[in-house]
Image (cartoon, helix red, strand yellow):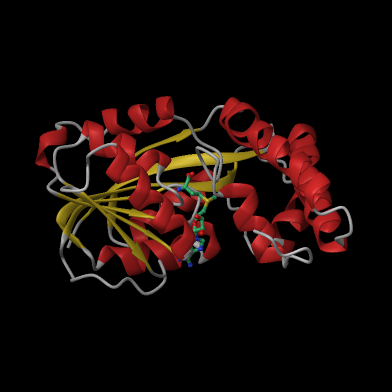
Amino acid sequence: MKNKQPSFLDLLLEAHIDLERQGPGSPETVLKALKFLEPLDRFSQIADLGCGTGGQTLLLAKRLKGNITGLDLFPDFIEKLKAKTKAENLENRVKGVAGNIESLPFEKNFFDLIWSEGAIDNIGFEKGLKHWHGFLKNGGYVAVTCPSWITKEHPEEAQKFWSDAGSHLDPVEKNIAVMQDAGYEFIAAFVLQKECWTENYFKPREQVINEMLKKYPESDTMKEYAEINKKEVDLFLKYGSHYGYVFYIGRAVK
Ligand SMILES: C[S@@+](CC[C@H](N)C(=O)[O-])C[C@H]1O[C@@H](n2cnc3c(N)ncnc32)[C@H](O)[C@@H]1O
């Protein structure tokens, strides 16, 4: 990107496009979630919603035999997913589509499995699960991560940060009840390890942001972007025992 006065969105895309992941998670977590979904050969149509550049999409493609469609709001991320798919010779089974998880461009009752890491809170856990339910076959599965309160204490500073970022945290028990009300049998929920945030996401992102600060020395937007990212990290180091990403796994009952 040659623009010397990048927008906030330009910066967000540039900071994330070459990262392995665009949010907290890990290959170990993907494999742990898949354990709840065995036998895996029953999944022939899979969606990965909010797939980013597809770190987990390609891992899923290696573990599952079916066709996988990754969908993300940002066409640049989808182009990157397509390039990685080609490099791994998985083009016959992995597709990338630019679109919105709030209004999916797919056939109803089509998927055996809807996977989604780190995206559903952008539209709301309940709204997302209800909308996606229509795209699952009867008995199809959903496996989704969502930032959630994992203790009874909900520090106000953390609450404010998340709501300013357009997100909203609920306790795990509430989300499980929401999942059941949205038409799913609850299968499992587990909290992602801290390293999914610190080692796998914050550290590589910080390295890129430090380089970008040198690249855009005149940009106030860049400074502001770096500040917000630092605040997110500091907040997690301070309050990360109270909130975390939780993997929720359910089965659609129609
Ligand atoms: C935290 S990142 C996670 C990316 C990837 N799943 C991962 O775990 O590395 C959230 C992703 O959701 C996408 N996203 C957010 N809101 C979306 C929406 N309304 N429709 C489609 N994608 C969305 C973002 O573009 C971003 O790639």
Confirm whether residue 156 shows in the render.
no
Q: Position of residue 19 (x, y in %)?
A: 55, 40
Horizontal arrangement in the rendering, residue 10 relative to residue 23 (left or right): right
In this rendered view, identify the residue nearer to me: 66 or 129: 66
Seen from the viewer's position, the closer of residues 155 and 39 is 39
All told, the count of numbered labels is 0
User: Would residue 253 appear left or right of 184 to someone viewing this image?
Assistant: left
Quadrant where the C terminus lies? bottom left
Q: Residue 10 is drawn in which quadrant? A: bottom right
Q: x%, y% of residue 199?
A: 62, 26
Q: Quadrant of the N terminus?
A: bottom right
Measured along the vertical axis of the image, is residue 7 above or below residue 11? Answer: below
* Residue at the (28%, 60%) spot, across then down: 183
Q: Is residue 187 above or below residue 181?
A: above
Q: Position of residue 31 (x, y in %)?
A: 34, 28
Q: Is residue 115 above or below residue 188?
A: below
Front residue of this view, candidates 84 and 124:
84
Res. 125 visible in picture: yes
Which corner quadrant of the image does residue 181 belong to? Answer: bottom left
Report which quarter residue 209 is drawn in.
top right
Residue drawn at point x = 10 percent, y = 40 percent: 42
Q: In the drawing, does residue 159 fall left or right of residue 219?
A: left
Q: Position of residue 40 (x, y in %)?
A: 16, 34
Of residue 168 and residue 67, the one placed in the foreground of this image is 67
Residue drawn at (40%, 66%), measured in percent from left and top?
Answer: 101
